[in-house]
Image (cartoon, helix red, strand yellow):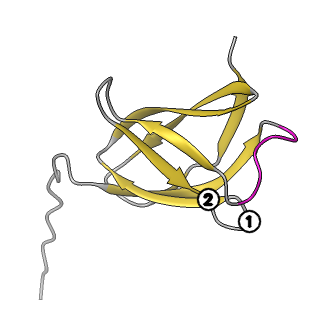
Amino acid sequence: MMVLVFCLPTGAEAGLVYGRVYGAEGEFEPGDAFTLIISEARRIEVKTDKFKGYSISIAPGMYDVEFTKNKKWKAVIQSYPQPVRQDIHLKEAK
């Protein structure tokens, strides 16, 4: 018996992105939130847990991340059609 399996592209279906937030030493605390920039007009606040962990479902693509507390910190994450771990490494914005 032969079984054929076809994998078709899923288009712009949301993919799960999860991980932890690192960087912004002494400023980013467990339970803090960062801003995920979807577009100029659309921003989403993402709150972390007690371990600085997060998870969000977003369409595949590259996204800027910002965090501001005394200074501005930035990073980039990427989403795929399938779940992916993307730790966020905040770096001071210049």
Query: Does the magenta-highlighted stretch encompass residue 78?
Result: no
Q: Secondary structure at mark 2?
A: loop
Q: How many numbered marks does the figure carry?
A: 2
- Left or right of 5? Residue 43 is right
What percent of the width, then of the height, locates residue 83? 42, 61
Where the N terminus falls, by quadrant? bottom left
Does residue 74 sit above or below 30 in this rendering?
A: above
Q: Which residue is mark 2?
A: 48
Rendered image: mark on residue 94: none
Q: Main secondary structure of the magenta part?
A: loop
Q: Nearer the viewer, residue 59 or 46?
A: 46
Residue 67 image position (x, y, % from top left): 62, 35
Residue stretch in magenta: 25-30
Q: Amino acid at mark 1?
A: Phe
Mark 1, residues whose alpha carbon is within 10 Å: few (<14), some, or many (≥20)? Answer: few
Q: Residue furthest right?
A: 26
- Residue positioned 57% across, 43% down in the render: 34
Query: x, y (%) of residue 33?
Result: 59, 49
In the picture provided, is 26 more to the left or to the right than 33?
A: right
Locate residue 56: give its quadrant.
Answer: bottom left
Task: Say what amino acid the circle numbered 2 marks.
Answer: Thr
Front position in the image: 32 or 7: 32
Q: Residue at x 64, y 61 (%)?
A: 53
| For the residues bearing labels 2 and 1, Cβ distance under 8 angstroms | yes
Quick one: 9 or 27, which is closer to the camera?
27
Q: Which residue is mark 1?
A: 51
Residue nearer the viewer, 2 or 38: 38
Q: Secondary structure at mark 1?
A: loop
Residue in the picture at 37% in, 48% down: 80
Task: Quarter of the image for the C terminus: give it.
Answer: top right
Q: Is residue 3 above or below residue 63?
A: below
In the rendered image, the residue lying farthest to the top is 94
